Amino acid sequence: MTASAEPGPGTPLDARMTVVIATRNRRDELLENLRHHESPVIVVDNASTDGTSAAVAAAFPEVTVIPLMINAGAAARTLGAQFAHTAYVAFADDDSWWAPGALAAAADVFDAHSSLGALAGSLVVGPGEDPDPINAVLAASPLGTPPGWPGPALLGFVACGTIVRRRAFLAVGGFDDIVRFPGEEERLALDLVDAGWQVAHVAAVRAHHHPSLQRDTDRRRQSELIRSRLLTALLRRSWAEVARQTGTALVSDGGWRALTEAIRRSPAALRARRRLTPATEASLAALRSGVPLPGPADGTRVPIRTR
């Protein structure tokens, strides 16, 4: 599908934004949370065995449902974005939704910033709407807020709190089938930045997250995150960084399992391997060290390129 044209001023929200949800075997939670969404919704069902696709089609006939025969992982979001016809795509999980007015505000930010490729909002968690700790991390990004940007520059985000410019997202390949849940966001963020797109935090754009009780154990999740970091390094970083991530895996709880899973996917990762530009590597170094990159005389920092 070809990318849609960029919207003009005053374009209605439903012509600018689509919500894409990837789900698997969380039928009841998905049905409960779908009612909160304000924009057209595409649900990509990762081969659920609990009747998710039929239940959503029956309860929400206005929702587009794409049932998959296999679990495509995070790549299901990419398929959803390909089916969308709007300029912007907001990702949500089956246990999350965007706050009232958030998507309209985000669309306005995108309309005003033609180089913005991804917008990471803020997250509130549970019925008490407690701020997710990630909010403070994003707001305090060592990369600062370059001139003309809508918020602090980032090299990562949380998928269920992120909105993308569809053509930028698809141009860099979207979420792939190499780095699966969780930790799939890093490679995408790096590729967007490497292609010259802005990735920024806009705190006023808020999403609700009520974490599902149907989740992997903490130990398994830690193992999966180690696997994803290792595969991301193999895809985009230096061999020294690949070795560092491998060493970390070997001494981490669940690391051997992560290493075994990463090795199984390494042929595909090697075929898709491409080193990041020096500018993006410099931004990564600044982010990891917490030391801002030098900027102009006025004190602002311009850590990465814009289009």
Image (cartoon, grey):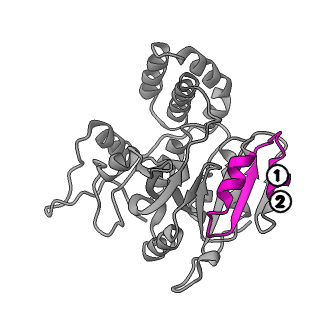
Q: 294 and 259: which one is in front?
A: 259
Look at the image and tell me whether residue 86 can be seen.
yes
Residue 90 drawn above or below residue 287: below
Residue 297 drawn above or below residue 223: below
- Tell me which segment is drawn in magenta: 27-56
According to the image, label 2 marks what residue? 57
In the image, what residue type sits under mark 2?
A: Ala
Q: Which residue does the image show at 51% across and 63% down from the upper left?
A: 99
Q: Do the CB atoms of the residues marked 2 and 1 lie less than 8 Å apart?
A: yes
Viewed as shown, does residue 119 lie left or right of 221?
A: left
Residue 108 drawn above or below residue 223: below
Q: What number of labels is visible?
A: 2
Q: Secondary structure at mark 2?
A: helix
According to the image, label 1 marks what residue? 53
In the image, what residue type sits under mark 1?
A: Ser
Q: 45 and 212: which one is in front?
A: 212
